[in-house]
């Protein structure tokens, strides 16, 4: 079922029917149809992973804790992978009892260089996951041990071809973070539990060469964290069935490709689908990708290793693809897949050099600064090989918006680069329920037509999201391969007709919706509403459980907290004044949902901004754990709004902003600054000018309750859980209201038809 983007309401999609004609080319399927682990084993593995990820994280936010779970899983993988490789080599050489894990570090050093040349890294036996885990109970300096091991693994590749692939991989696994505990003993206890839990996972035997349990576990973890993270999760993870469809589209009719590329590769899940579909040796030059977010870039590199992709076969780079593209010496690419960030900002026509960039110049116009979607399309087209295929996920607006985006579509269509457009169902991706689409690009086409496929009805319900089943994917691929008309599902349209239609690429403009009959429409609608009702019932039960926990916590909160002023608890840092000319256009980073007023306008994540590098020495920067507080607002309520800054990038603050630094849980402080008590105290200090202001000296006089660190963590966890559940319930209610409206309209038409058109 599709979503009307302007009205936010569902509209009926076509009913699934068998394809009317066989495919003209073979449809790509996974190279190994036998699953790596039996489904029962996989389900048990997933249950264990869920337990680890939820039970062990404690006070650490789930999104942050992923770095620890994934990092330790990666540490175990490289340890066992290296051990299995060296054991096999020595046993083939005539030593059947060889066990690398039992070797001394001195003996192992003799083979260091050969091991690095072959595997890309080296781990001495004492530093292997299993051996560190075995000693963990007696290691009072476990955090230092792990930090040293992680550094040594990365350092082993320095000077080798694999150096860039290993550098900084463990940066996000901060074993000395206060998030793990207030004391070294508490942190080490959490680290021991992590080692034990990850070590207890049944991931099979490397020597059997029959399983991909590590890769499966990693994918499951990333999917779980993406679902938990909502919008931010959707920025780094593409659902596996969508990823498989994209990769399959680009290799239809081929058994191997020269190279695979993703300009916004996220966690690398899209690129890895080529390995699943074609086989491990069928991407000849390897996998190429670029990612702008450091944490996600590290996830992608780990993901490659965990799927046993040799270091010399993947080439991932950190950076902004649109402004600073990597792989200039490796393009063009035979197969390109991408799920680029939707409607992200970029420099666009503010940068006079971009219009002359050979990637963007052919269209004669740049994508708008507020929406870089078409900039990614032009970049991908520029780097596509003459005989290659690209499949790109896009939001529907890209297909029909006017202005510069329409001019870029005109360039693509007039030059016969658009091969197909596929309308996908709604609610496939994390962080959005909008029905997305796929644009397929080719530089060498047999005709001057575009195939439009309406797959908005091709989905199954799975949990609280929709999914593309194998049958759904097969039908889409069959239509693309056949490249012909199929009633209410696919239509081949001449480019001339598309030009006459204002160069719109919106699928409903060319494929008539199915005359599905009232019974089928009712079935789809009623099924969707029933699923929403079940989801709401689950959420309400969870809300009641959290409220019960809050009630229990409240009984002893008063006795456990001491009220102190902010001045007693920490220090305030004031930002430096700078102007709009000092900063790039995307002045504000989208890092929090709290809106905070500044004299530059209302922006998420307060007044935090990216600034030009030549100012970096003059500015004051937010650090992880700071509470960012607005000093200025249009109303009293706007003043002193606060956000806990938990980002990792260097960001500067200007003089409308304070940073509050303390040993408290920053999320607890930001919650305390939302209370009626804080607001009542704040009113005494807010200057009554046109723009309301408050000084750091005044804020320092305001008191907040200060329970123990464990109690702070508990309060934050309870409020975070309740906030997420209420937000999810609100979204469900809005979705149900839209579906109920459509249901009403459907039954109104049915009642008033009086049998018209009935067979």
Image: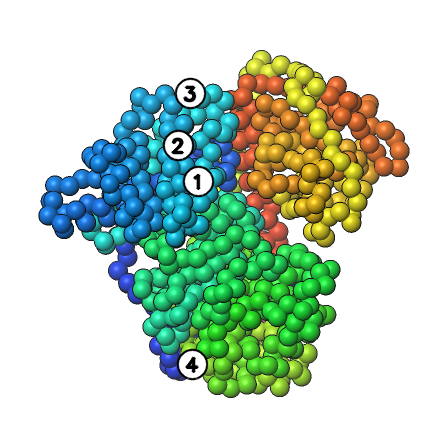
Q: Earlier in the sequence, mark 4 or mark 1?
A: 1
Q: Tell me where residue 177 appears, x and y as whole percent.
A: 49, 29
Q: Earlier in the sequence, mark 3 or mark 1?
A: 1
Q: Few, some or many C-alpha atoms within 10 Å of disc 4 (few <14, some 14-19, many ≥20)?
A: some
Task: Give the residue at x 28% y 43%.
Answer: 112
* Residue 185, label in figure: 3
Task: Give the residue at x 52% y 64%.
Answer: 328
Q: Callout 2: helix, strand or loop?
A: helix
Residue of label 1: 170
Residue of label 2: 148
Q: Cα distance, mark 4 to mark 3?
A: 64 Å
Q: Nearer the viewer, residue 360 or 2?
A: 360
> Quick check: can you spot residue 189?
no
Q: Tell me whether circle 4 and circle 3 mark residues in contact (CB < 8 Å).
A: no
Between label 2 and label 3, give the one nearer the viewer: 2
Q: Tell me where residue 278 appears, x and y as whole percent.
A: 34, 67
* Residue 482, label in figure: 4
Q: Earlier in the sequence, mark 4 or mark 2?
A: 2
Q: Cα distance, mark 2 to mark 1?
A: 11 Å
Task: Give the residue at x 40% y 74%.
Answer: 252
Q: Callout 4: helix, strand or loop?
A: helix
Q: Tell me where residue 67 appears, x and y as whole percent.
A: 45, 40
Q: Cα distance, mark 4 to mark 1?
A: 47 Å
Q: Nearer the viewer, residue 319 or 463?
A: 319
Q: Few, some or many C-alpha atoms within 10 Å of disc 1 (few <14, some 14-19, many ≥20)?
A: many
């Amino acid at each position: 079922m599709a979503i009307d983007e302007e009205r936010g309401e569902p509209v009926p999609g076509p009913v699934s029917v068998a394809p009317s004609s066989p495919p003209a080319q073979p449809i790509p399927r996974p190279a190994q149809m036998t699953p790596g682990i039996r489904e029962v084993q996989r389900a048990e593995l997933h249950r264990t992973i869920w337990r680890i990820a939820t039970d062990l994280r404690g006070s650490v936010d789930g999104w942050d804790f992923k770095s620890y779970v994934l990092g330790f899983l990666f540490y175990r993988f490289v340890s066992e992978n290296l051990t299995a490789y060296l054991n096999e080599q020595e046993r083939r050489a005539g030593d059947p009892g060889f066990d690398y894990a039992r070797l001394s570090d001195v003996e192992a050093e003799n083979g260091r260089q050969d091991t690095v040349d072959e595997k890309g890294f080296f781990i001495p036996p004492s530093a292997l996951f299993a051996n560190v885990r075995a000693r963990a109970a007696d290691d009072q300096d476990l955090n230092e041990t792990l930090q040293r091991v992680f550094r040594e693994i990365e350092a082993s590749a320095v000077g080798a071809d694999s150096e860039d692939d290993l550098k900084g991989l463990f940066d996000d696994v901060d074993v000395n973070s206060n998030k793990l505990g207030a004391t070294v003993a508490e942190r080490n206890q959490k680290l021991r539990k992590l080692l034990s839990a990850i070590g207890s996972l049944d991931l099979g035997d490397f020597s059997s060469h029959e399983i991909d349990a590590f890769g499966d576990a990693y994918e499951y973890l990333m999917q779980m964290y993406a679902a938990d993270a909502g919008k931010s999760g959707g920025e780094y993870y593409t659902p596996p069935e969508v990823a498989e469809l994209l990769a399959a589209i680009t290799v239809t009719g081929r058994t191997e490709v020269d190279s695979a590329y993703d300009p916004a590769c996220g966690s690398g899940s899209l690129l890895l689908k080529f390995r699943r579909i074609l086989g491990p040796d069928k991407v000849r030059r390897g996998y190429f990708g670029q990612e702008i977010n450091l944490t996600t870039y590290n996830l992608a590199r780990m993901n490659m290793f965990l799927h046993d992709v040799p270091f010399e076969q993947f080439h991932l780079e950190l950076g902004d693809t649109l402004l600073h593209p990597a792989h200039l010496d490796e393009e063009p690419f035979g197969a390109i897949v991408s799920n680029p960030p939707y409607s992200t900002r970029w420099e666009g026509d503010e940068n006079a050099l971009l219009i002359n960039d050979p990637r963007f110049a052919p269209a004669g116009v740049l994508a708008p600064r507020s929406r870089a979607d078409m900039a990614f399309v032009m970049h991908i087209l520029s780097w596509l090989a003459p005989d290659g295929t690209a499949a790109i996920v896009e939001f529907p607006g890209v297909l029909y918006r006017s202005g510069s985006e329409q001019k870029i579509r005109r360039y693509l269509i007039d030059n016969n680069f658009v091969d197909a457009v596929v309308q996908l169902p709604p609610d496939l991706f994390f962080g959005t329920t909008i029905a997305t689409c796929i644009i397929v690009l080719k530089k060498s086409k047999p005709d001057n037509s575009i195939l439009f496929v309406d797959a908005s009805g091709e989905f199954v319900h799975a949990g609280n999201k929709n999914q593309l089943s194998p049958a759904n994917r097969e039908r889409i691929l069959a239509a693309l391969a056949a490249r012909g008309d199929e009633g209410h599902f696919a239509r081949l349209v001449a480019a001339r007709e598309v030009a006459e239609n204002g160069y719109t690429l919106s699928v409903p403009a060319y494929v008539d919706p199915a005359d599905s009959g009232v019974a089928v429409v009712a079935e789809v609608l009623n099924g969707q509403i029933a699923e929403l009702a079940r989801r709401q019932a689950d959420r309400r039960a969870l809300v009641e459980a959290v409220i019960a926990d809050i009630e229990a916590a409240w009984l002893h909160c008063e006795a456990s907290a001491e009220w102190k002023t902010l001045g007693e608890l920490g220090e305030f840092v004031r930002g430096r004044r700078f102007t709009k000319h000092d900063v790039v256009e995307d002045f504000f980073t989208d890092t929090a949902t709290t809106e905070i007023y500044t004299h530059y306008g209302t922006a998420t994540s307060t007044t935090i901004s990216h600034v030009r590098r030549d100012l970096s020495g003059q500015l004051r920067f937010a650090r992880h754990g700071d509470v960012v507080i607005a000093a200025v607002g249009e109303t009293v309520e706007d003043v002193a709004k606060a956000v806990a800054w938990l980002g990792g990038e260097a960001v500067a603050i200007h003089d409308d902003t304070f940073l509050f630094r303390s040993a408290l849980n920053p999320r607890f402080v930001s919650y305390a600054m939302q209370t009626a008590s804080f607001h009542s105290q704040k009113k005494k200090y807010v200057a009554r000018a046109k723009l309301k202001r408050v000084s750091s000296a005044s804020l320092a006089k305001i008191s907040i309750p200060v329970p123990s660190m464990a109690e702070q963590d508990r309060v934050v966890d309870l409020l975070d859980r309740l906030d997420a559940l209420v937000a999810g319930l609100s979204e469900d209610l809005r979705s149900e209201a839209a579906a109920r409206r459509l249901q009403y309209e459907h039954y109104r038409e049915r009642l008033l038809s009086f049998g018209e058109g009935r067979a």
